[in-house]
Each structure stands twice: as C-alpha cells, then as structure tokens.
Amino acid sequence: MNKQQKKQAGLARRHRRVRGKISGTAARPRLCVTRSNSNIYAQVIDDVSHTTICGVSTLGPAFKATGKNGATVEGAAELGTIVSKLAQENGVTEVVFDRGGHLYHGRVKALADAAREAGLKF
C-alpha cells in the first residue's frame, strides 16, 4: 500500500466513524462536506428518504459568480453562505454537520461557521 492509498483509507475510515454516529432526517437533514485540494462541495441530505435536498460546489455557477477561489478559506466561507441560503429556500433551518472524515479546521470550519452566520442551526 503506497502513501496515497494509506491517506485515502484513513479518510474513508474516519468518514465511516463519523457517519456511524450521525444521520439526517426530514426534520434535521445532514450537511455533508467533501473537499479536494482545489474544490469543496456541500450537500444537504435526508438519509431516511435517501434524497439530496440541495447541493452546491465551487464548480457551480452560483459560486463562480462570486469570483472567489474554491481552494481558499474565503471561498469555503462563501460556499457556506450559499448553501445556507439554498437550504433555507428549500425549508431547512436546522441541520446535522457531517465533516466527512476531515478535520474541523480550515476550509471545513470556515464553511460551517459561514453557514451558521447565514442562519442555519447546527
């Protein structure tokens, strides 16, 4: 197993551990964050009915209109604001945060804090 495979296996193991403890419902869906080196993705998911309520990424038109970079903390914060507004338009006010096996630090933390400031409750 090379270094890249070890990192991916560790991330998958941490994500499984997080997902074993949290689950999204219709009343309180899950805000799932996935990130790569250059982009970040956020989805609001109802695990009971297996549906995605809304989802945004740094590759989408809503984010590209801001002119920010998806690989930065500022870009992640902007994405958190966008996902919060989109979720509220779909009737979601409270979510469970799923950090996706990543540390609650940097871009993941910036997205969560911006979503909180925009009105989502965690």
Image: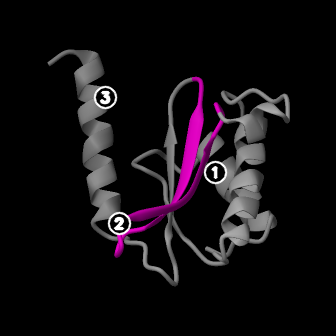
User: In this view of the protein, which residue sits in the foreground, 55 or 22?
Assistant: 55
Give the SS element for disc 2.
loop
At label 2, the amino acid type is: His
User: In this figure, which residue is indicated by the disc labeled 1?
Assistant: 109
Q: Up-down: is 36 above or below 32? A: above
Mark 2 neighbour density, 10 Å: few (under 14) some (14–19) many (20 or more):
few
Give the SS element for disc 3.
helix
Residue 31 horizontal side relative to residue 49, left or right: right
Residue at the outermost top position: 2
User: In this figure, which residue is indicated by the disc labeled 2?
Assistant: 50
State yes or no: residue 51 in magenta.
yes
Residue shown at 63%/75% (left/top)? 92
Residue 6 horizontal side relative to residue 43, left or right: left
Q: Nearer the viewer, mark 2 or mark 1?
A: 2
At label 1, the amino acid type is: Lys
User: In this view of the protein, which residue sits in the foreground, 76 or 44?
Assistant: 44
Among numbered discs 2 and 3, the one appearing first in the sequence: 3
Q: CA distance from mark 2 to mark 3?
A: 28 Å
Magenta span = 38-59
| Residue 68 spot, x, y in % from top left | 81, 30
Q: Up-down: is 49 above or below 83? A: below
User: In this figure, which residue is indicated by the disc labeled 3?
Assistant: 7
